[in-house]
Image (cartoon, rainbow, N blue to C red):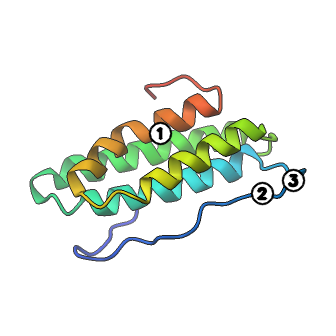
Amino acid sequence: MRPFPRGATRARSSPRRYAAGVTATVGELVAAAIEATEALGLLAEEVEDEWTFVTELAAAQTARLGAIADRRGEEPATDAAAAAVAAAADETRLIADPHRAIDWLSTFPDLVAIALGEPIGG
């Protein structure tokens, strides 16, 4: 994860949605998940006492998701996986509390892993 200046606002981009009959790839879903993970990390960095933990966790979770994309990026994703990842990413955008962002930073990648049929826990 790239360093962000303290106090910066996080991006509120829209989750990627696909028209009926258009298949997303696993790589596209993971890219959206990485974007959400980075936004969670940015928000969580506001907890100064946890800054080191948060930056290391965000980097590890981003690398974990990146490894999935490296292995399966071109693979077509199922509609159910696309919907699940989009729904989970939508939830991350509702988080305003930095402490809650730390919780989600710890668990969000597991939701993505489950949606993609990957093992949880890294």
Q: Estimate the x, y position of residue 42 in percent, counting from the top left.
A: 32, 63
Q: Estimate the x, y position of residue 47 in percent, counting from the top left.
A: 15, 58
Q: Under tag 2, what secondary structure?
A: loop
In the displayed structure, does residue 71 sit left or right of residue 3?
right
Closer to the camera: disc 1 or disc 2? 2
Dot placed on the residue nearer the N-terminal end, 3 or 1: 3
Mark sitting on residue 109: 1
Q: Estimate the x, y position of residue 10 in percent, counting from the top left.
A: 38, 71
**Cα gap from disc 1 to disc 2, whole angstroms:** 21 Å
Q: Amino acid at mark 2?
A: Tyr
Q: Under tag 1, what secondary structure?
A: helix
Q: Under tag 3, what secondary structure?
A: loop
Q: Are marks 1 and 2 in contact (CB under 8 Å)?
A: no
Closer to the camera: disc 3 or disc 1? 3
Q: Are marks 2 and 3 in contact (CB under 8 Å)?
A: yes
Q: Is residue 106 above or below residue 8?
A: above
Label count reads 3
**Cα gap from disc 2 to disc 3, whole angstroms:** 6 Å
Q: Is residue 65 above or below residue 9?
A: above
Q: Residue at x 57, y 47 (%)?
A: 87
Residue holding disc 2: 18
Residue holding disc 3: 22
Residue 115, by quadrant, is top right
Residue 113, by quadrant, is top right
Q: Residues within 10 Å of mark 2 (few under 14, many from 20)?
A: few
